Amino acid sequence: MAKKSALRPRLRVASLFSGAGGLDLGFKRAGVQIVWANEFDRSIWATFEANFPRTNLDRRSISEIDATELPDCDGLIGGPPCQSWSEAGARRGISDGRGKLFMDYMRVLAEKDPLFFLAENVPGILFERNRRAFWKILSGFSKLGYNVSYGLLNASHFGVPQDRERVIIVGYRSDTDLFFVPPSPEQTRPSLKTAIWDLRNSALPDSRTNNSTRQPRLPNHHYMTGGLSMIYMSRNRVRPWDQPSFTIQASGRHAPLHPQAPPMEIVGPDKRRFVRGKEELYRRLTVRECARIQTFPDDFEFRYRSINDGYKMVGNAVPVELARRLARKISRDLADVPRRPRRRRKHGAVKRFESEDLG
């Protein structure tokens, strides 16, 4: 009888800047084991620990953690905080304390020397003003012995009902002689109707701001009210049912409006208004609707005291389905690669993947 080949063990991954765990859940759904996670924001701890009860969550700042304390792993994943690089943020880039967290990411990577890493960030990191700082990061990864691939992906091309562009950076150890290329994008994009149609009649306003004792049947299916600023009213916030959502942001005040309402009317430069006679149809998406659009399952419960913390956790997450597809591609690429590096490692190279290269 022929001897059966041994099954290759699952990839083991450590997660930095885990947030609520969108990236972690996507990797878990792709068959990857999350062996350790790190999140410093105390408002997120209850949510992560409730949904990942078997994962050890380290609550310290990454800058306080000795990398030797992490368990051995095959991969390192996580997106260092993006506010420093965003168009709406302070635009300080790597000079900001949060921007320097990339250096801590590299410090851990250098110590653990895993088979691969994945980092995610906002499109602003590609802006011309950030070019030198971003290249310093990419070249730093390559000097650690990784072949680095990076590029801009829209989550709506990968099973997510949302226009959401993010920069994805993946490095494979240079001794693999491999470069990551994302999976092929889909031609058909999922819509708001496919994501949240069944939730349209059961949403409730947030009880903590409306003095109501009613609670939604589905956890987190309530929405923030009030606070429609001039900035918010400067452009249309309604996408129709047959289109993907606008980007889900990390703030309840900037949450998109529900597609039951007609698009907002233009009344002047950078000024919109609700269609008269239809005002009652305009409400923000609920936390649960935003979570559905981010492809979180309904049994993933977000725990918070302030509803804005719920929107923040959902909006800062990597869409689960995008993460799953990236993880599945990485797992396939590395299926037959030895887990431990060769004794001598060369510096890696850096490549940008373009849309015509995907596949």
Image: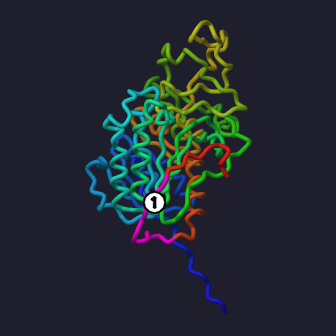
Residue 181 percent across, percent down from the top left: 60, 53
- Label 1 environment density (alpha carbons within 10 Å; few <14, some 14–19, many ≥20): many
Amino acid on which disc 1 is placed: Gly
- Residue furthest bottom in the image: 1
Residue 18 percent across, percent down from the top left: 42, 48
Magenta stretch, residue numbers: 338-349
Q: Quadrant of residue 190?
A: top right
Secondary structure beneath label 1: strand
Residue 353 or residue 291, whichever sits in front: 353
For residue 155: magenta?
A: no
How is the structure coloured here?
rainbow
Q: Which residue is mark 1?
A: 75
For residue 345: magenta?
A: yes
Question: Is the stretch drawn in magenta largely helix, strand or loop?
Answer: loop
Residue 340 percent across, percent down from the top left: 44, 70
Instruction: Tell me, yes or no, if residue 224 can be seen here.
Output: yes
Residue 80 percent across, percent down from the top left: 40, 43
Relative horizontal placement of residue 98, taking residue 312 as reference (left or right): left
Residue at 41% from the left image edge and 58% from the top image edge:
14
Q: Quadrant of residue 246?
A: top right
Instruction: Tell me, yes or no, if residue 49 can be seen here.
Output: no
Residue at 43% from the left image edge and 53% from the top image edge:
142
Residue at 61% from the left image edge and 39% from the top image edge:
154
